[in-house]
Structure formats: C-alpha cells, structure tokens
Image (cartoon, grey):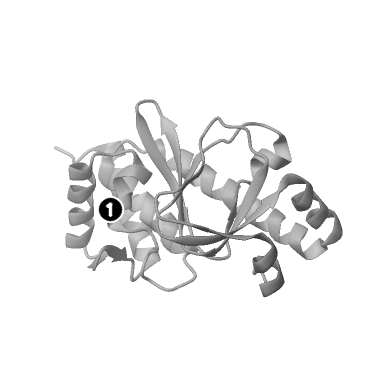
Amino acid sequence: MNPDDSLLQRFGKAFPRGTVLFREGEPGGEMFVIHRGHVRITMRAGAQEQILSTLGPGEFLGEMAILTGKPRSATATCVEDSMLLVIEARTFEAMLRGNAEIAARMIRKLAERLEQANDTIENLLVADPIARVAHFLAGLATREPRGIRLSVPTAELPGRLSLDKTVVDGAVDHLVRARVVIPLEGGLAVPDVARLRQFLDFLRMKAQFGEGP
C-alpha cells in the first residue's frame, strides 16, 4: 500500500517515538499503514518479550483484529517518530470491497506473514544456538529485496531468537569466523545465502551424529 496525498491528509496522524499503538490482548477497531518511520511488533512468551518484526514505510499492521474480531495478537510500538494512516474498521472493510488491488495486496502480505510465522516456529525448534542464528539469518537473507545487508539490526537478534545476548553474540562471532556472515555497523550481511545454508546443514549433521570419536 502506497498512500497518496489525499489519503495522508484524510487519515494521517503523527506518533512520537515510544508510542504504543496497541497492546497484546486489547480489542482492535482500527488498522495502520506506515507512511514514515518504523513500528516494532512484539509478543509475550512467558516472562520474555519476543520481537516478531520491525515494519517500515508501506507496511500495514493491526488488520487481523478487524478481520477476525479477536483481541490484538501482539503489541505495536513506534521505534522512531512516525507518520501513520489510521483507518477504522468500517473504512477498511469498504476499501477491501471497493478496491480489488488493495484486497490482492492484503492477501499477498498475509501469505508472506504466514510463511514467516512458520519460519519462526521452525527456528524456535532448533536447539543449538549457532544453528538457530544461522537458520534465522538464512531465512531473512532469502527474503531480503535490498541485497546482502540484512534489515534486522544485530541488537534485535536476542529478542527475535529468544536467546540471551551473550549467546547470540557468541553464535554470530562463530558465523563470522566461518566467513558465512559479515559484520557491519549495527548489522550483518550474508554475501552468499547458499554457502550459509551449506554451513547450516553441516551444523545439523554435527548435532545429529556428533563430532566422532
């Protein structure tokens, strides 16, 4: 969704950094389209807060509570000063009925999110921390449209992977020494996804068969 000026004038609203747009478990009567800024999506997992994603311009959020009529499944927080389109349930439903292009984009985006959710579940089942980090980075690199630099900052990895920061740092260092990941300022790059997946297969075989006598 790329909102034009008329939509921005009608539905646009500024939100300062740190604003909680909605909380997990609350009822939802509106959705949001990001025009400027970034919004972090989190979910409680026991005593910990799991970072699900960080959305940027053109992305939308909050639509599931409208479509299903159920409470919010996650918490959304502005990580910087942002400009969002705030669209109420009735307006959103009218847009879906009256604009086939918007409906098609919504379906594609929901399919992508389902795929990402499956990847997240699969990732959390990986016991070895190095393999878990490698699996996450390989999946992210496969979906990245902007080249080898990954969009997730290094600081977000512990929350995204449900691992302690020291464990993640050690795993990333291992991958860097294996030359399948390159450290950048505040982030990471994967120069060759196929090579990273090969390394991941090696880690899985090592975990399954051990290091030998």
* Looking at the image, residue 72 lies above or below residue 132: above
Q: Residue 180: tell me if it is visible.
A: no
Name of the residue lying farthest toward the left: 213
The disc labelled 1 sits on which kind of residue? Ala
Nearer to the camera, 139 or 66: 66
Residue 187 in picture, x, y percent from top left: 29, 63
Residue 153 in picture, x, y percent from top left: 32, 59
Q: Image point 72% across, 41% down: which residue?
A: 67
Q: Is residue 13 left or right of residue 159?
A: right
* Looking at the image, residue 3 lies above or below residue 116: below
Residue 91 in picture, x, y percent from top left: 77, 52
Residue 206 in picture, x, y percent from top left: 26, 43
Name of the residue lying farthest toward the top: 46
Image quarter (top left, top right, bottom left or bottom right) of the C terminus? top left
Name of the residue lying farthest toward the right: 98
Residue identified by numbered label 1: 155
- Judged from the image, the secondary structure of the residue bearing numbered disc 1 is helix
Nearer to the camera, 33 or 180: 33
